[in-house]
Image (tube, rainbow, N blue to C red):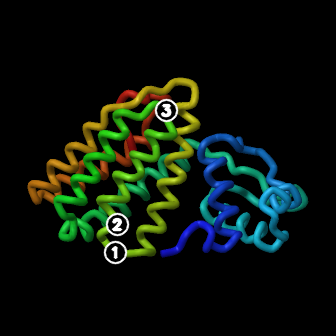
Amino acid sequence: MTTARDEPIAVRISRALAERIISGALAPGARLRQDAVAEEFGASHVPVREAFRRLEAQGLVASEPRRGVRVAGFSPEEVREVAEMRAALEVLALRHAAPHLTPAILGRAEEATRAGDRAGDVQAWEEANRSFHRLILAPCSMPRLLKAIDDLQAASSRFLFAGWRAEWEAPTDRDHRAILVALRAGDVDAAAAVLARHVQWVGHRPGPTPHRRGT
């Protein structure tokens, strides 16, 4: 089993910076300085540059000629694009995962939803929410598809953190529960329909409405 300590330093750096960007600790436009990042992580510039390339591939940073690397912003059009891509890819993953979803997996997914209901802050809620999605999609056993979905979910999380920073309360997620009911009944079409609507909602929300549902 690979642990965080076994991972390449570039992966650890990119993951740590991604968490800061997604949470809003690093704001859009903030400059990422190679020297400072290398010093913080006790690394040379080579893994730092690799980490920056990883972040750029995820759409979290942008490299600008003569200006270095900065945290990328995002537009309403990008939010909608990510939501629609997630809807298509997560439904594909769910259809492949459904035959392999056991009662134990669905039970863990239900517990993740309850953990989201109990969350005391937006970060705890977001972790529970992403756990739910990973649990029901991972059995598709399609690593490239799951990696693409994970990157899109990271982008969605960033949009939500930005929109909910000033006002947040733990939502009651009816969509997650409807998905579980459909999956337990063997109705994959219904589960896929709810999931598609569920993840596209973030791309059409006009402003912070944290009480409606998760993503």
Q: What residue appears at the point 42 percent right and 75 percent down from the top-left corner?
A: 143
Q: Quadrant of the C terminus?
A: top left
Q: To which residue does mark 3 refer?
A: 121
Q: Which mark is residue 141?
A: 1
Q: What residue appears at the point 28 percent right and 63 percent down from the top-left corner?
A: 94
**Residue 119 image position (x, y, % from top left):** 41, 34
Identify which residue, 110 or 162, lies in the foreground.
Answer: 110
Of pointers 3 and 2, the one earlier in the residue sequence = 3
Of pointers 1 and 3, the one earlier in the residue sequence = 3
Q: Which mark is residue 26?
A: none
Amino acid, disc 3: Asp
Which of the 4 image quarters holds residue 105? Answer: bottom left
Q: Residues within 10 Å of mark 2 (few under 14, many from 20)?
A: some
Looking at the image, which residue sits at the far top? Answer: 167
The local secondary structure at tag 2 comes to: helix
Q: What residue appears at the point 48 percent right and 47 percent down from the top-left corner?
A: 80
Q: To which residue does mark 2 refer?
A: 138
Q: Residues within 10 Å of mark 3 (few under 14, many from 20)?
A: few
State the CA–CA distance, disc 1 to disc 3: 32 Å
